[in-house]
Image (cartoon, rainbow, N blue to C red):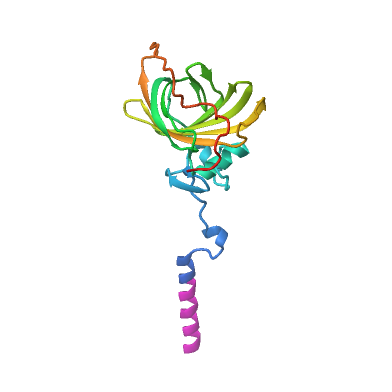
Amino acid sequence: MKKSLVNIILFTALATVGLNCGSLDPKENSKKPEYSNGSSGNNNTGNNGSNTGNNEDNTSGAKYGTWNFDAPTEKAIDDSNFEIVDGPSPPNIEGKYHVTGKFTDVFENYKSGIDSIFEFYNQQGANVQMKENQGSGRGNIIKGLGDNFTLNGTFKIDVDGCIQENSMLITGRKTFHNNLDTKGLQVLTGLSGDCEDYPTEAWATSEAYFEKIDSKSNIYKSMSLLIKPFPKNYNQHHQ
């Protein structure tokens, strides 16, 4: 009788421990990874909090969330450790801006400051148009959350018969005064035409401040552009 009573008590204790510990099935206890709003190179960092909207689908191991980049751009993002912001609700950045800044991680013969005029317009959802002085980008996508965003557009630049295809990434934050504090990554993605001595692979990073100006302003700089062609014999080695 005593032995039976001990067995009953032991069984009851084990059952209670089992209930308190939850399921032993690892699938039941595993947590769905939280969606990271900022990714830099191969490492995703900067969790933005709870998953919302389409972000719940971005936990399948995609390298840059919902972004899809071509191979040269992805390689440049990894090599430069450039930060990418993803999300369904970027800030509205429409307006004309005076842009000043500098190139921060460039190849040896590509040093210059930035002093230019930039305009963003017709922002609708994930699409926005942009132009720098007389040149305009196409296929421009903007994503983000809150005041943080990444914009990706493509530019064609004709340099004495050599057509350079460029991808331009701008990651930044919209400030209280509606200015933009940004970092940029320009990537050479393709060449066509007479391109002897021009590089086949190149990228440059920048830091720039976009100060909003009157939309009717006719200020035009003689230009140290944010987006510019890569020159001949561009040094492929960092300093």
Residue at point 47% right, 80% down? Answer: 10
Instruction: Judge by depth and name the residue closer to the eye, 131 or 161.
Output: 161
Where is 74 relative to 119, above or below? below
Kindly identify the residue that appears in the image at 63 percent across and 21 percent down: 161
Q: Toward the viewer: 230 or 154?
A: 230
- Identify whether 22 is placed above or below 219: below
The question of residue 133 being in magenta is answered with no
Q: Which residue is farthest bottom? A: 2
Q: Is residue 8 magenta?
A: yes
Residue at (67, 26) in percent of width and height: 192
Residue 197: x %, y % from top left: 62, 31
Can residue 68 be seen at all in this image of the molecule?
no
Residue at 47%, 89% in the rendered image: 2
Residue 168: % across, % down: 52, 30
Image height of 157 relative to 190, above or below:
above
Q: Position of residue 57 (x, y in %)?
A: 56, 42
Q: Position of residue 169 (x, y in %)?
A: 50, 32
Q: Is residue 179 left or right of residue 140?
A: left
Span colored in magenta:
1-15
Q: Can you tell which quarter of the image residue 229 is in?
A: top right
Secondary structure mainly formed by the magenta segment = helix
